[in-house]
Amino acid sequence: MSENEKPKVHTLSKDEGLTNGGNNVSSNVSDEMTEKFDLATVYVSDAQYNRNSVFDTSPQTVRLYLLYNHWFMQTLVYVFIIVNLALALFEDPAVVPLPIWATSTTEIICLSAFTVRMIHYAKIIPKDKFWKDPKNICIIVVVTLSFIDLTIYGALKSTGYFAIRWSRVLRPLLLVNVTEGRQLRRAFRSIRNALPQIAYVFLLFMFSVLVFSLVALKLFGKRGLLTIDGSPYFTDYVDIVFDLYVLVTTANSPDVMMPAYNYSDSFTIFFILYIVINIYTFMSFFLAVVYSNYKKHLKEEVRQLVKARRFKMCRAFSLLQEARGEGGEPVVTQAKWNHLVKLVKPNISIAHRELLWSVLDDQNKGHIGKFAFVQLADLLSIQVITVKSQPHPIHICFPSMYNSPVSRFIRYVVHHRMFVHVYDLIILVNAVFIGLDEENPVVSNAEWGFLVLYMLEIILKLYATEPRAFFARHHFWNWFDTIIIVSALFGTIINSALKHSGGYTGRQILDIVFILRVLRLIRLVDTIKRFRAIINTLIKIGPTILTFGQLIVVVYYIFAMVGMELFKGTTFAKLNYCKNNFNNVVSSFIVLLELTVVNQWHVLTSGFTAVTHISARIFFILFHIVVVIIIINIFVAFILEAFLVEYTVDKSDLQTSLEKKIEELELNVQQDGVDTGLVDAMESNDNELGPSEAAKQKPSLMFKIASRRSRTVDGLLQRMFETEIHPEDFEEEEPENINFSNPVFDSV
Amino acid sequence: MSENEKPKVHTLSKDEGLTNGGNNVSSNVSDEMTEKFDLATVYVSDAQYNRNSVFDTSPQTVRLYLLYNHWFMQTLVYVFIIVNLALALFEDPAVVPLPIWATSTTEIICLSAFTVRMIHYAKIIPKDKFWKDPKNICIIVVVTLSFIDLTIYGALKSTGYFAIRWSRVLRPLLLVNVTEGRQLRRAFRSIRNALPQIAYVFLLFMFSVLVFSLVALKLFGKRGLLTIDGSPYFTDYVDIVFDLYVLVTTANSPDVMMPAYNYSDSFTIFFILYIVINIYTFMSFFLAVVYSNYKKHLKEEVRQLVKARRFKMCRAFSLLQEARGEGGEPVVTQAKWNHLVKLVKPNISIAHRELLWSVLDDQNKGHIGKFAFVQLADLLSIQVITVKSQPHPIHICFPSMYNSPVSRFIRYVVHHRMFVHVYDLIILVNAVFIGLDEENPVVSNAEWGFLVLYMLEIILKLYATEPRAFFARHHFWNWFDTIIIVSALFGTIINSALKHSGGYTGRQILDIVFILRVLRLIRLVDTIKRFRAIINTLIKIGPTILTFGQLIVVVYYIFAMVGMELFKGTTFAKLNYCKNNFNNVVSSFIVLLELTVVNQWHVLTSGFTAVTHISARIFFILFHIVVVIIIINIFVAFILEAFLVEYTVDKSDLQTSLEKKIEELELNVQQDGVDTGLVDAMESNDNELGPSEAAKQKPSLMFKIASRRSRTVDGLLQRMFETEIHPEDFEEEEPENINFSNPVFDSV
């Protein structure tokens, strides 16, 4: 540690004295302090995780609120939601049929859990706020309706009547309206905000389809043309509209135009115009409308989010502030700050905390003002990795052996570039062997050789690098390699053991072993810098893709439930599609995925329409509009925006200040120089430790910004528009609309 | 006209005196002046149209240059290019076969025309510049190669050998490299600039496809599964890669996964992962890469364009400048300026010119400095419509009748909103009648009724509005209506005449009449404001869509020529697709369009592959990469950007200053208030004249900014980034890289 760090360690011990000493003087004062710290902790962590609940500030409520936001409680809620959603697997039409009493009991347990959670929440939130919040009302309504439906269904079934579990459609709403579903609600809000404009473009698009259909009717209707299956071509207006709508999905191109084309070349002009206008222009227009709205709306949301966050930090500040000097600005002392940070992030290392303080208190005054204090929430969300350069365990146990020339040579070789290249070559050779027939004894024996080589690589690396550093949390590829190789080793051993014992062939295990073998090849990507940059961007977008995953699950679930009621028991054998049906929730999801990909859309649609009723088309068109036109476009809009942000916004100012401090303190780990190319602003690699030789001349404790990654979706969103929000502009008053995170059911 | 305009009219007459007076004093001075004006004119119009040729400034060359840029010469070049491209229709394999001597002669004429044009250009441009310009070299090479190919082909054919017209592939390059093809070259440059980055993403994407294919081979290869046509499923690695590549186009979804799905539900996980990663994520990523590059590159291009434009305007200024006072800044007098504007835009109205001057010389000094002068090129590209409120001709001939209460009432009714609504209703009823069977006598008679109603509408409108105002150039819908109705009237009359005369049924005429009838319905769009806004944005994007049209023609043409050589004479009857072939250029284009839409991609591809060779797949995959992955994404990127610009950038500052001036002079036509909604920044409507009652109290001459539309692509592009370019920042030196418009063949 550098010289000027020492006084702070001293302050730290003063801080310890603060709480202890407080106890001695007066337990009342201490209690009051503790309560204040509790409340401040809540404010800071609310700011950090962008929670927007308005709670009573009484000490008891604060404790209840802390319990409510405990990770265990939050996980439990999600477990119950998943169980509740998964019930669809066991309810009629079931994948694995279970008796009604079993599913009903499970559902009652889940619903009770939600009720308890709701009561817990009601105890924290002021009454008037609680009842004004649409998401609470939504949960209460869903839970109540589910209970009612369950009762009616049970009663009807037991008396032998026909009954529908209609409340199942409502289940995914719980996922949306639960307190933790902020990201999902935001995604829905994006959609809702874009809806009016999408609607106008959609109406114009439909007008265009209708006009084209009318032209088609007049041009082709009287010509007596036949489709390939012998039915009359373009004679009924409603059918033409449907066929041309399907053409927009491209699913029936070019079949829909073949009869006209076979009749006359000039009729293709009609279809070319249709394709250019309705497929390319209008579909791009949908994307443009969604994208521009998404961007606009996101900006506003993030602005409010930052405002709310600052407001909360100001509150925390006012709890801990004390006047410094006469008429001086109120400040927070380092002792109090340290205590707060320890409460907010219990497992933060002392070094990390010292680092944060030195960033905030850059003039080394021992106290910070409001402006610096407010930055704490942002600083805490930056992942700083504390790298301790500890000596290797073998070095401690057998220092002479570890420093022997042979050992030094081995370590030199392992850290050499050629070592990586040799293993890349081995992987490539391995890829060829994987492609070959594994029943050939040469190939299956070679596999053992490869396994040994890979194991050797890991062991060598562990020998050359300190194991705790090797398995540091952010060394993704080290973890990846080790898990894949060890699993493959076990799999191969089990497999050959089973083989030799005869009898059972263990096809499943073999499949897994095959997949593991192929997955090893992925590591090749990591050796090419530009690929690594792309992969890093993909990983960064990852969390938000998960949000969209939830969104898709919600929409699919609702459509699957409705679809199952409409189409269950219907199958059609065309094109071997008998498994594409709505006979259970898994099949339904797969059919819906196929409908999302859009190809053969008309075959699937007409299949279901044929066995039910022509109006079933409405279900499929609705699905197309919701998923393909809206959700997929929102997804593309997100990827676009995320990519552009990665590309243009280098990193947030705060991160830079932290990095500057790390550099100042000369504690930074040297990062590999990254080629400026494909993605200048994409991040530098963080998956390889600097050579240990270089590390020796460095201080034993080093910091590193964790890959400049904004790991949370909020962080990424915030970065998107951070440049446009003034850091000095923070408000004292409560933001006008603190409830902005729940307007899924607001009026438009 | 307002008071302060009068002195300028006086100045105008001074201006007339300038040239006449000049002649009297000395013809040498006048000649010199004329030459200077000629040169200045060239600079200004080069700046206005963003031409970047560097020419000699000798008077003779300037005159040659003016001839070179004459609209007639430019049109002629395009005619020859089109004729040259259209030769493919008549050459073997031909749509309309012509003898070889006919097509060869035509081609020789075209090639000679290009040669003459090239020689003309060489006379204008300094030698060294000429030979450094890749587009000139490209044209020379293409023309030379075409001559050589033509000679070889003629010789071989006449001696009965097999010959290929390989130079036909090069023809579209003329379209790209001709001086006027600036937009097209820019589009190609956008693509070329995005290529390196697309390549990296594409390689990673292919790596992903290869890895997935390997997993598929291991998972499904040994299971003995069969596809629907009984062939083994996923047993050959190369076939798997191809099948999974096709899945990315979505063309074989869900068929490709059905055998695996039918075997086991859990195998769908493989396909779901594949679809999420390779279809949704990577395809969005392609769009993101293309979009971000497009944006970045465009910005740089426009920046250079604006620089070059300012440089040219500065040159023009320095030709006409004169020192004002001692040590004063050089200025250009109004007289000279007027003369220049008349030369640049011969058909500009005096009023319009006065308006422009009053914008530039806002302090009414009688002369302008460099900064104001430079703005001329931008001002000239803003379309200002001069609206003269003339009395109605009937009013002049029969004033008493025109002002009679009945006549007044009619005019009141026609201008009333209800008049529009009544006709909207009539159109709706008409739509229903169009949908009905036209062989029903009631329906066919009703058609006459509708025609009369529509004719009546036009006549009434012409009665109520001054005809010249009604048919003003910017009144799109008036023109549209009149043309459609009159054509429909003539068509219907001819049709029924033919019908009554018996014999010939005139199916073609009937088709046209039907289409005209349906087209009438489009006018409905115009009555809904939000639709009008969307349509206006579409119209604005129009010119650039035309550029993309050229781009597509170039790419299609090249692929069609290659495809015809590879696949001519091959057809396959599957799915009635026998007309989908490469047997002539029209069929080829249609097949390529079908391949662009991507559906049934594998059916078409495998059809051609089956009749030729498996390696034909390369041709189709290449086409997919070029058109679907690159060009379509560039197109979407353009629409996105154009939409966002329309949405966020209100209008350029210059337009605002012009508008302000118009407002100041109280000469602006009151525009209909436009609802702020869908497209706030989309433009207000300009298709309806204000009520004539209101116009009466207005001055007789009014100006109007033509719909704030940037009618040229350059204008739109410039607006995109104008806000980021400082207006004051203009350079005296020649921009570093004046040749930036021709780097299609630069090294990367």
Image (cartoon, coloured by chain):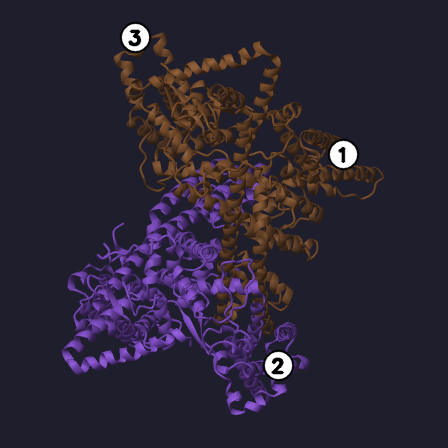
Chain colours: A purple, B brown
Nearest to the observer: residue B391 or residue A7: A7
Q: Residues within 10 Å of mark 2 (few under 14, many from 20)?
A: some
Q: Chain of mark 2?
A: A
- Marks 3 and 1: CB-CB under 8 Å? no
Name the residue carrying label 1: B100
State the count of labels. 3
Given the current orientation, which residue lies at the most extreme right position?
B159
What subunit carries mark 3? B
Instruction: Please name which of the two marks, 3 or 1, marks the residue nearer to the observer.
Output: 3
Q: Chain of mark 1?
A: B
Same chain check for tags 3 and 2? no
- Crowding at dot 1, Cα within 10 Å, few <14 / some 14-19 / many 20+, comes out as some
**Placement of B160 over or under A725, stated as above or below:** above
From this viewpoint, is residue B531 visible?
Answer: yes
Q: Position of residue A317 (x, y in %)?
A: 24, 65
| Comes first in the chain, label 3 or label 1 | 1
Question: Which amino acid, by three-letter code, is at mark 3?
Answer: Ser
Asked if the residues shown at circle 3 and circle 2 are in contact, with their CB atoms under 8 angstroms apart, the answer is no
What label sits on residue A713 in the rendered view?
none
Q: Please give the residue where the numbered disc 3 appears in the rendered image.
A: B400
User: Where in the figure is residue A378, as x and y percent of width and height?
Assistant: 35, 64
| Disc marking residue A453 | 2
Residue B214, compared with residue B674, is above or below; it is below
Q: Amino acid at mark 2?
A: Leu
